[in-house]
Each structure stands twice: as structure tokens, then as C-alpha cells.
Amino acid sequence: MTKTLKDIAAALHLDVRTGEHLLARTVTGGYAGDLLSDVLAHARKGSVWITLQTHTNIVAVASAKELCGIIVVNGRTPEEATLRKAGEEDIPIMVSTLSTYDVVCQLCEMGVKNGEGV
Amino acid sequence: MKEFRADLHIHTCLSPCADLEMSPRNIVSEAKRKGVQVIGICDHNSAENVPAVEKNAAREGIAVIGGMEVTSKEEVHILALFGSEESLFTFQEIVHEHLHGINDEKLYGEQVIVNEEDEVLGFSNKLLIGATDITIERLVDLIHEHDGLAIAAHVDREGFGIIGQLGFIPEGLPLDALELADPSKRDCISQGNRLPFITSSDAHKLEDVGRRTTTFLMEAANTVEIRRCLSGVEGRRMRI
């Protein structure tokens, strides 16, 4: 069944920091990574990105790779400048108190997988 | 003006990942042997061995730029080089307030603080290998507030390099220079800010001291002159 950012945000109790109005976006897969160069190289369009980075560059990377949104892990606080930029670029940023591993596990359980779709 | 061969990124035995033989005396004699006239001492997130290196270097006519290699919140390594011990240690206090955790010598290595005779004064118990919680923008500002030079370390390396960690160099980040681990990678680095390049050894063991150097044509070996060199003021220049 197709999952949206809204489904994920509800199931994982995410704190939606920007892009509340964009949560109807379909999540076509996921990517986890904290080296932004690696995310630029490997993340697939339409994926949700799980990271601990909070620098404004995450918005540029998500935008360049056409990712559907960003989940920041471990309850980290995105910089003000990052949230501002995310608002301008229409990139939803959601914060989880969980670790990357736990977020990925839960997304898997929900059926969010790469490949043939969700 | 005069040419100075400088290796601005050398670790001492204070860095947990550096060899114990990286003592102030050994570093200075190795630099002397290799004809390096200016050495930058940059341990991870700490500067406690700078005074001991300075005392040895003064005897040998080698200039020391005291600094440290700070790890930002994004886990980017930034070299912070200062013109005076006062600025350096004021800056160190701030870094230490933002660096959390205790070192485990068995896991990460010893962090040895020494005097100018290479005698052990003690051990730092801070987690020097860790990251501070200072954002890269704030870090560069802090370095400048203390009249220091902010140089992005080994930008051509994926791990802890600014491009590897952050994908690209954030627009408008007021860095003073970019350090290359391998000077032949110069043309592979894309940057909009047209920042100058230096190269240095990032020596963690003795034989690597002076393995890579930047030659500065300037009036004197200090951070004020290096800053002028980096922006090419009045005929000053540099080559890698």
C-alpha cells in the first residue's frame, strides 16, 4: 500500500518542523546517510532521507535529489537557517527521537522499501 | 620578502591517533632536518602541547603557529591557527566547553601532555577524537573573533572533509583557505568561493612531518602575514 509522509509522521510520532502542507507526498523509498556527498551520489528520487545532519546543506541535497522529505534522528534540532531554507525549497523536515536504525526498522515494518515501490 | 616552507598541520602525541614519538623535540628536529621553517601544531580539539613545541622551535629558529584541528557539529575538520597563545587558549576554553565525553585510552589511544624536555606532564581525559556541538558557521566566526585563520582540512578526503560531510562547501562560509591532502587533486575540488589552497602533511607519525608543505612568500612567519599571503596582498604569494 502506498505510504505518504503523513502516514510515516503519524506512525513514528515525528515532530514536523517544516512542510506540514506537503505531507501528502508519496514515499517511494528510503535512504539513510550522514555523509552528504554519499547521499548526493546514491539517494533515489522520491525517497525519504534519514540523517543526523542538521546543516542547511541538507536542504540543498534533498532538493537536488528530489527527495520527498527529511527525517532528522536522535532528537537533534535543525538550525534555524535550515528550517528557513526548507520552507523556501518545499522540503518537509521531521524530527524523531529515535536513532537511524530504529527509524529504518519502523519504516521497513510499514512497508517502505526501495525497488518495486511501496 | 622571503620564502618560508610551511607545514601547517602536524599532530603531537596529544592526539590519541598520533604516534607517541610525536613529541615536541622530535617534531622540531624532524622539521629542521627536512628544511621546514614554519610548523603549525594542530591536535584534535586541543592545544596543550603547543607551548612545549614553541620552546624547542625557538632554539632551532623554526616558527610555530599554534592551533588545533577542531571537529564541528557536522563532523567537519577545521584548522584554527592563532597568532598568540592567549588567543589560542581562550579559544581552546570555548572548544572544551562544547566537547563532551571522556577518552578511553584502550580504545582511542593515549593523549599525552608533555613539556619542552619531552617529559610527561599528564594526560588529557577529554574525548579529543569526538565532535564539538559547534556548527561550522559558528566555528569559523569564533576563530575569526579570536583573530585566527580558519582553514578547511583535507577537503579532498571523504571522511571529516567539508565536501565529504556536507556535499559541497556552504555558500558564503568565510573560510580563509582549503587544505589539500594531495595537491594534485586541486582541480577536482569545485568551489564557488575561489578560496586559496594550501597543502600540509597532517602528520601523525614522525616520518610524515614535512611530507607536504606550502611555500609562502611573505615578510615574516606569522598568522597576519599568512593571511595577507592567502589574499595576495602587495606581492605576497604562495605555492603548493
Image (cartoon, coloured by chain):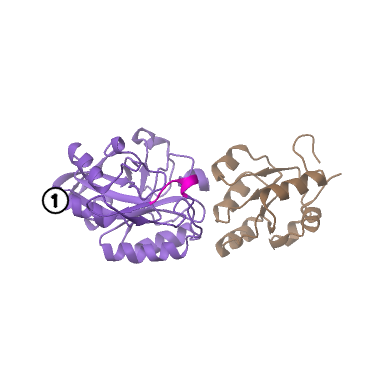
Chain colours: A brown, B purple
Q: Residue at position x 39%, y 65% from top?
A: B93
Picture quadrant where residue A98 is located: bottom right
Can residue B80 be seen in this snapshot?
no
x, y percent for residue B137: 46, 59
Please state the chain letter of the residue tagged with numbered disc 1 in the rendered image. Answer: B
Q: In the picture provided, is A46 more to the left or to the right than B113? A: right
Q: In the picture provided, is A48 more to the left or to the right than B195? A: right
x, y percent for residue B196: 33, 46
Badge 1 crowding class, 10 Å Cα cut-off, few under 14, some 14 to 19, many 20 or more, is: few
Q: In the picture provided, is B223 more to the left or to the right than B15? A: left
| Quadrant housing the N terminus of chain A | top right
**Residue matched to label 1:** B59
Can residue A48 be seen in this snapshot?
yes
The number of callouts visible is: 1
Residue B194 in the image: above or below residue A13: above
Label 1 element class? helix
| Residue B108 falls within the magenta-colored stretch | yes
For this rendering, which residue is in front, A12 or B216? A12
Name the residue type under label 1.
Answer: Arg
Residue A71 in the image: above or below residue A108: below
| Residue A68 falls within the magenta-colored stretch | no
x, y percent for residue A6: 79, 56
For this rendering, which residue is in front, A87 or B13? B13
x, y percent for residue B70: 41, 54
* Magenta highlight range: B105-111
